[in-house]
Amino acid sequence: MMDLKDENPRALELRISRGFNLASFNPHGISTFIDSDDTVYLFVVNHPEFRTTVEIFKFQEEDNSLLHLKTVKHELLPSVNDIIAVGPAHFYATNDHYFSDPFLKYLETYLNLHWTNVVYYSPNEVKLVAEGFDSANGINISPDKKYIYVADILAHEIHVLEKQHNMNLTQVKVLKLDTLVDNLSIDPSSGDILVGCHPNGQKLFIYDPNNPPSSQVLRIQNILSEKPTVTIVYANNGSVLQGSSVASVYDRKLLIGTLYHRALYCEL
């Protein structure tokens, strides 16, 4: 956890309640939901032993700890990448592969099957709500809660989907970009989308320390308009930051995460 209101923010590891299996904890995408009574729930995509679960925690501010509440497993959640919470036990999730078996995942990507999807989960209903992506990756929601944004990393696209009353999604538009779009976050002050990107994705998988993967963060303004404005917030050739995958901004303070390198804190 980082408090970006601090003059010199520092990362603090949160203690997790007893009984939770930390040995197999392999966190991926995360999301928070603040309930009407100000309870903060943290949702974490977990890959214990190459499987997929979603772990739901309650944040306990008095001692900066996480109380584990629930583990979610479902056949419609075979390979979850990212998640956006929309209730205390409700979320949309992206599956970046249709299969869970490692060999079948590789085959699926090689054959370019377009079988990845978005699933809605609640305690009473689990259903497929969007499909046909090359590789559905980052997911987020507009400040007015009307639209869901999904990054299709291999297609270089961001999909805008309208949320219906029954939680189904209807595609509104697709924004094409010339970079691999990974995770999405929302600027709370403007509603702009910040995107962690990979301008040269091949370098992520064939790593050369003498020619490392670059980093790039984009800001997308007015995505619903006919011509959204796309600007580069941060770019580096890998000398400082390698493989940027996500960026979050608050009050002109920017935090950039990476696949396997470090995090970078910037003041805009």
Image: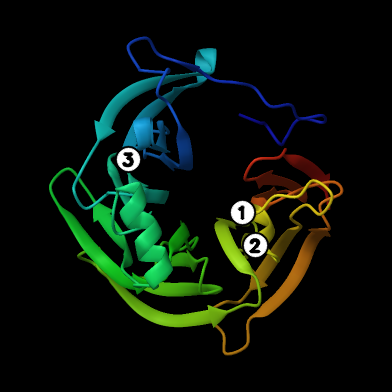
Residue 151: percent from the left, percent from the top?
50, 65
Q: Which mark is residue 205?
A: 1
Residue 144: percent from the left, percent from the top?
45, 63
The residue labelled by disc 3 is: 52
> For the residue labelled by badge 1, is the local secondary structure a helix, a strand or a loop?
helix
Q: Going from the N terminus, do you reach mark 3 or mark 1 first?
A: 3
In this view of the protein, can residue 84 be seen by the observer?
Answer: no
Query: Residues under labels 3 and 1: Cα distance?
Result: 22 Å
Residue 58 is left or right of residue 122, and the answer is: right
User: What amino acid is found at the position of numbered circle 1 in the picture?
Assistant: Phe
Task: Verify CB contact (< 8 Å) between mark 1 and mark 2.
Answer: yes
Residue 216 sits in quarter: bottom right
User: Above or below — where is 109 with respect to 84?
Assistant: below
Q: Going from the N terminus, do you reach mark 3 or mark 2 first?
A: 3
User: What amino acid is found at the position of numbered circle 3 in the picture?
Assistant: Thr
Depth check: 168 or 203 in front?
A: 203
| Point 36% across, 31% down: residue | 49
Depth check: 204 or 53 in front?
A: 204
Query: Residues under labels 1 and 2: Cα distance?
Result: 6 Å
> For the residue labelled by badge 2, is the local secondary structure a helix, a strand or a loop?
helix
User: What amino acid is found at the position of numbered circle 2 in the picture?
Assistant: Gln
User: Above or below — where is 157 with respect to 79?
Assistant: below
Q: Which mark is residue 166?
A: none
User: Above or below — where is 20 with respect to 117?
Assistant: above
Q: Which mark is residue 202?
A: 2
Residue 36: percent from the left, percent from the top?
36, 39
